[in-house]
Amino acid sequence: MWHPCLKLLSNGKLTVLSFDKVPVQASPFVRAEFDLHEFEKTLKKITDFFCIMPLIEAVRSLRSGNLPARVACFTFDGGYADWRCGVIPVLEKKAIHATFFVATGQFSGRPMWSERILHVVKNAPAELQDVVLSDPSAPRFGFGDLNARRRALTLLSHFFKHQGLEHREALLEELEGLAGVFINDVPCMSIDDLRAIHAKGFDIGANSVNLPILRCCSLDQARREIGECREHLESLIGHRIAAFSYPNGIPGEDFEAKHVQLVQQCGYELALTRGGGAANGRSSLFQMPRFTPHKSNLFSSGIQFGLNLVKKISQVIEPVGGERRVLMVAFHFPPQSGSSGILRTLNFVKHLPSHQWHPVVLTASSCAYEEQRNDLIASVPSSTPILRAFALDAARHLSIAKRYLGVFALPDRWSTWWFMAVFAGMKAVKEYRPAAIWSTYPIPSAHMIAATISSFAGLPWVADFRDPMVSANVPPAGMRRKVWRRLEAHVLRSAAACIFTTQRAAQEYAERYPEEAHKCQVIANGYDEAVFSGVKPARSGIDRQTLFMLHSGLIYPRDRDPSTFFAAIQSLINDGSLDRDHLHIRFRAPKHGEEVADSAARYGLSDVVDIAPPISYEEAIAEMLGANLLIVFQGPNFNAQIPAKIYEYLRAQSPLLAVLDPAGDTAAQLRSFDGVFMGDIRSSQDVRRALLEWLMELKMHGNHITPRSLEGVRSFSREAQAERLCQLLEAYTQPICGEDCKYGA
């Protein structure tokens, strides 16, 4: 009965469940406490209604727009010895993942304040009546019977919760002295407990050092509580701590916007609150709501889960630094996978805020993407709104027997997102008041959307072509070419600036549209320096005695044809220049893997050529760093383009084999760098010559070619590109979109 309702209500929402101690046996002093037996019963109800996912994975999926319906996550706060012998075996038995948020003060000899109070209540002598602490605002209490102890626990917990750190500690010591109990007798989670939980595959999060209400702390105290907890946990388990749980966690009551900023500054990926509700795609990553289910039967459990899904969540308002925003229209954006264009947009989004431009991303719904991966979504700043407009892929959603009307693919297969994207974009203009619009090719409908919003809202528009839209053979003759040609002309006339990745492409468009020549600007592709920091070379099981050649990324069988490379390799194996038994050539995520494998087979290289599946971006960078030779292919049809991967290759400092047209822009760019060996893509003999030059260098330097200097490479960092884009935005916009906007609040 409840499953269809919860599926409908949970669409695009994430339920995060919160628990605390869950002792093996309930304490008689804590009325509402879940003991292990009650938890197991509740667990069964939850798993009847929800699919359980790890917290980090679920939050990334939520932000990527591809979270399945009825998903929930388990979290536990505090740090209790009971966990290891209680909830952990239960969760393991059910194969349920959970994240455990731990307070680290107990590892330095200071048990959690709540456990110290409970220890006092359990062990204080019954004759201790009408107790008064030195603080005049403290409640009166006694320990005569069970009810008195329960009342004392409730009163003391509420009072101590809202005390400052030093005052709370002094009062705790006073209370323990009155009760005649000792801090060393209070049960604590041990470092061994922590490491054992992590070793079993559960995630660890930070819950502060001493569990203070952050509003009761000075700013420096709050910073130490948030930051030192993470550092201590990472030092103990040797693993990154990504999530933080606000102590007590009620927004506005227990923490404020300044504490949210502290959590961000301390390097967390997300933070959790309490107070109920379910997170959605627009929820702040640093105020993800949670709720604790109460004890109930199956019917009322369904009701409480449903009510929680529709509950309005409480959040403190997070200020956005700076006033200038840019609406960025991009089809290629996480979770889409398989396009290098994602990285260009993603890195603009990452680095623009450091120049006081704050992106608002308008992209397509995840169902439009044939290939998806959620790892890159973590690179998007948490403060960046991501708006997803409904989109269909004509080839997958509007086809019958894999055939569809050509009109459905004008100007591209995803043109269905135009209407909803314009609607969402106009709402974004009203809500966020951007000063400019930016859009990016190679999906032409992105430019259509930006052009429409720019026209309606009266905002300046920067069109990022990257590469030429219309060239000699692309698109082929027919209706699409006519539509693209008209759209291209409209973009050049309407946009304030048009960006290309090479000087040749910009010059070509300046000559094609001489009246708009002044708009044609160049921002090259590049690499993200931050990704290379801390990444270690990886060879994925390939031993050091084997020559490891790597091509990372797409192969186009016609325009990035590896045939001459394979012919050159075959020739070098035959004459003994290469040892087949110590050679491994990998094509990582080429998309057209079958064609590459067939081509390798024609040259008898199936045993040395490996077609490998996609991996995360960081893993791909590590593999580039571990290769003996990196390979790029670029045919004559792409002479006006420079693939983004060459900048990552250059930054990796490994030797680079470029199989290309010597007359192209890629060749011109690479000639200024050391450690690059170029061969003509049309000549296997020339590719063989380039490979022999590399082998000779390798032999001369004892299998270790000196890495190229990074001086020339750093100018192609994504940070430098973002600065250049900021200069363009500032040249064409006012600091704030104000009275000149046609469309506003």
Image (cartoon, rainbow, N blue to C red):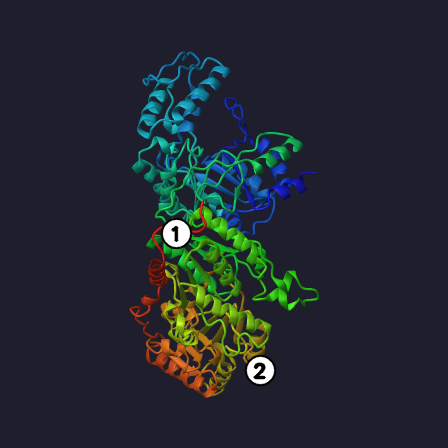
Q: Nearer the viewer, residue 303 or 50?
A: 303
Q: Residue beneath label 1, please?
A: 740
- For the N terminus, the quadrant is top right
Type of the residue with mark 1: Asp
Q: Nearer the viewer, residue 459 or 161?
A: 459
- Answer few, some or many: residues within 10 Å of disc 2's Cα (few below 14, many 20 plus, some between 14 and 19): few
Are the residues tagged 1 and 2 within 8 Å (C-beta)? Answer: no
- For the C terminus, the quadrant is top left
Q: Nearer the viewer, residue 330 or 285?
A: 330
Residue 80, how many percent across, how many down? 46, 34
Residue 548, how many percent across, how many down? 45, 73
C-alpha separation, residue under disc 1 versus residue under disc 2 = 64 Å
Residue 154, how many percent across, how many down? 46, 21
- Answer few, some or many: residues within 10 Å of disc 1's Cα (few below 14, many 20 plus, some between 14 and 19): few
Could you tell me which residue is drawn at 37 percent across and 25 percent down?
A: 182
- Tag 1 secondary structure: loop
Can residue 125 be seen by looking at this rendering? yes
Q: Is residue 38 above or below residue 425?
A: above
Q: Which of the 4 quarters of the picture holds residue 390?
A: bottom right
Type of the residue with mark 2: Arg
> For residue 602, which numbered disc appears in the image?
2
Residue 22, how many percent across, how many down? 52, 32
Q: Nearer the viewer, mark 1 or mark 2?
A: 1
Q: Is residue 521 above or below residue 48?
A: below
> For residue 52, which numbered disc appears in the image?
none
Asked if residue 374 lies left or right of residue 715, the reply is right
- Tag 2 secondary structure: helix
Q: Is residue 459 above or below residue 401?
A: above
Can residue 266 be seen by looking at this rendering? no
Q: Nearer the viewer, residue 189 or 436?
A: 436
